Image (cartoon, helix red, strand yellow):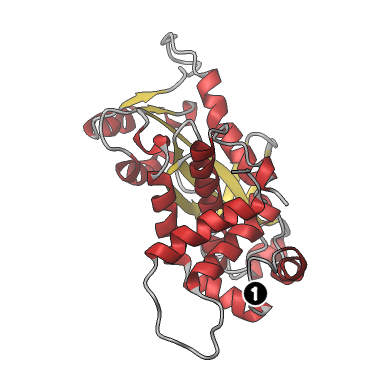
Amino acid sequence: MDADLDTLLTAVYCTADDLLPERPGNARRRVTDAEAVTLCVAQAIMGIPSDRRFLAVADKRLRGLFPELPKQPGFHKRRRRLKDTIEWLIGIFAADSPGAHDDVVLLDSTPVECGRSLETARRSQLADFCGYGYCKSHARYFWGMRLHLCAAPDGTPRAAALVAADRPEREVASKLLPVALRGGEAVVTDKGYAGADFELAVERMDAKLLRPARKDEPDNGLHLSTIRQRIESIFWTCKDLLTLERHGARTIEGLAVRIATRLLTLAACVALNHRLGRPSRSLVAYVA
């Protein structure tokens, strides 16, 4: 079996079609939920944030897989309604990957910028949900949200949360880790998660916190740069191939489901790569 776009979309569709309940017939709804979810994955892996432009490309590129394509307004509404389904399918694909049982969990967050001008921050429908945060990689402040992610080293998403950029990382992590951990894992983080209370909370979850020592602390002998590069690589995959930073959302509902779609695409690619014996985070072959 070749690793290409058609193979990925077929795997997503078959999984969704087998597991999702059949909805009552509707003469106006010609595209099933499984097809709508698969179209969301196709949009993410093809790197086309615009719904209108994606459907135009899909009409030429994906007609063999989708005899019926929704119109742009209908696709937008169906995606928002399928948010819970998409999040549930992330767990299904993640559970099918070895990373779901890995003893190492990587924890970090990345900026999800939602606007740059002051006028946008004041008038945007996202204003009540966003905040100002600092991006170390670009050495500047940004306005938006942060995606907090717990992932296995192979890229399998274990848990995720989208919160305002000014929320404390340890506060978010304390709520995220109970979902990601099963007991006995090593949680690898950066210096931003330093804190005795947080370390104690992780120990109570039957896990161990591993992080580099801060400048005001004695050397703890841990050299985590190699494993820490894994989570940075996962984020880079989401940003570069899955257009995380070019989400195009204007409402919190739209932003949440678009981020979930990126994570579903990542989880599906990782699971399929394991089955095909390919490097887990090698997504280039699926890009049209």
Q: Which amino acid, mark 1?
A: Pro
Q: Residue at x 60, y 74 (%)?
A: 76
Is 94 displayed left or right of 9 in the figure? left
Q: What residue is pinned by disc 1?
A: 67
Q: Secondary structure at mark 1?
A: loop
In depth, the one of 122 and 258 nearer the eye is 258
| Image coords of residue 171 (percent x, y) | 38, 43
Q: Residue at x 60, y 80 (%)?
A: 74
In depth, the one of 175 and 228 nearer the eye is 228
Q: Is residue 185 visible?
A: yes
Is 138 displayed left or right of 94 in the figure? right
Mark 1 surroundings within 10 Å by alpha-carbon count, few (fewer than 14), some (14 through 19), many (20 or more): few
In depth, the one of 245 and 85 nearer the eye is 85
When asked about the image quadrant of residue 220, the answer is: top left
Is 172 displayed left or right of 39 in the figure? left
In depth, the one of 103 and 217 nearer the eye is 103
Q: As displayed, is residue 283 above or below residue 250? A: above
